[in-house]
Amino acid sequence: MRAKEYGEPILALESTIISHGMSFPENLNFAKKAEGLCRESGVVPATIAVIDGVPHVGLEREQLEKVSRSDNIKKVSIGALGLSIAKGWSGATTVSSTAHIASLAEIPVFSTGGIGGVHRDAELTFDISQDLITLSQTPIVVIASGAKSILDIPKTVELLETLSITTVGYNTKEFPSFYSRVSGVPIDEVESPKDIIKIFNTNKSLRHSSATLVANPIPAKSEIPKKEIEEFIESALVQLSKQEIRGKEVTPFILKYIAKKTGGRSLEANIALALNNVALGIEVAKMMS
Ligand code: PSU
Ligand code: MN
């Protein structure tokens, strides 16, 4: 990347949130807005995806459009990254594969929507996101609005702790739950981008290789209270088992189902929280460079 050579601030962005997390054309508008916010602030946006077997750090306009239209775009987590490159596939990268590629490219900060985590019935399905393992092995600042409320938040936070992932709340003492600012699960608080960078650098000097996960709650005005969204999540989970949806289809299915049931309100909330994470990522990227 040219920006890297010139020492410009760069913010990594993932592409599965675009291809599988939102519908067209709202996803393309969101992606353009996220990149636009970066550019306006003097930060180079690096949306990461695999296009025809080549991992890209920063996408051209047509590539962003291809990802948004989900034309033959697979959802590629870290375990399938080498596979998709070797096979010449096109794939959108999740938090795990995006964080990995960003870290290889020496981009120290990455903004997303919500990380994957431990699914609610994980004791039966064993469905736990690759995101958690990758975050435990990848030294990068990841800014997310906690984990999606479709997950089991207490179990997810437990596993973050087990995997020794440094997790902090941005101006909050509670781990946020994506659509909502609260979850009842306590975490340590940080107050500024400066705090975040200090923690990240301290981890580096300690040779602790986990990510610094910054849980940034959704802006209050876009929040959907837990008791309102919960009903839809529960009916989504019923549909999920009825239709026997498993594996990597689970998260996209639930997001789509909830967007439909809330008349697009959950999609609006998703966009608002992701842009808010981009805004914080911009501040961190600028201060780091
Ligand atoms: N956050 C969003 N929308 C998404 C995702 C996160 O706002 O679509 C994606 C991310 O790419 C994350 C993935 O890594 O969901 C997790 O999928 P799984 O549960 O299959 O690991
Ligand atoms: Mn899964």
Image: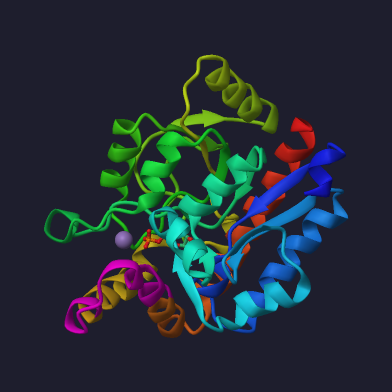
Image quadrant where residue 31 sits:
bottom right
Residue at 60% across / 41% down in the picture? 104
Residue 260 in the magenta stretch? The answer is: no
Where is residue 117 shown, x and y percent of the image? 34, 52
Image quadrant where residue 286 sits:
top right
Where is residue 145 shown, x and y percent of the image? 51, 51
User: Which quadrant would the C terminus be assigned to in this image?
Assistant: top right
* Quarter of image, ligand 2: bottom left
User: Start and end of the magenta stretch?
Assistant: 240-255
Where is residue 131 shown, x and y percent of the image? 41, 49
- Mainly helix, strand or loop, the magenta region? helix
Where is residue 26 shown, x and y percent of the image? 63, 79
Image vertical order of residue 147 relative to residue 249, above or below: above
Image quadrant where residue 163 sits:
top left
Q: Is residue 283 left or right of residue 256?
A: right
User: How many marks do you count on the picture?
Assistant: 0
Residue at 49% across / 36% down in the picture? 138
Q: Is residue 241 left or right of residue 254?
A: left
Furthest toward the left, the residue is 124
Residue 242 in the magenta stretch? The answer is: yes
Image vertical order of residue 249 relative to residue 202, above or below: below
**Is residue 216 at least partly visible in the picture?**
no
Q: Please tell me which residue lies in front, 287 or 57.
A: 57
**Is residue 105 at least partly visible in the picture?**
yes
Residue at 75% across / 61% down in the picture? 35
Residue at 42% across / 49% down in the picture? 182
Q: Please tell me which residue lies in front, 39 or 262.
A: 39
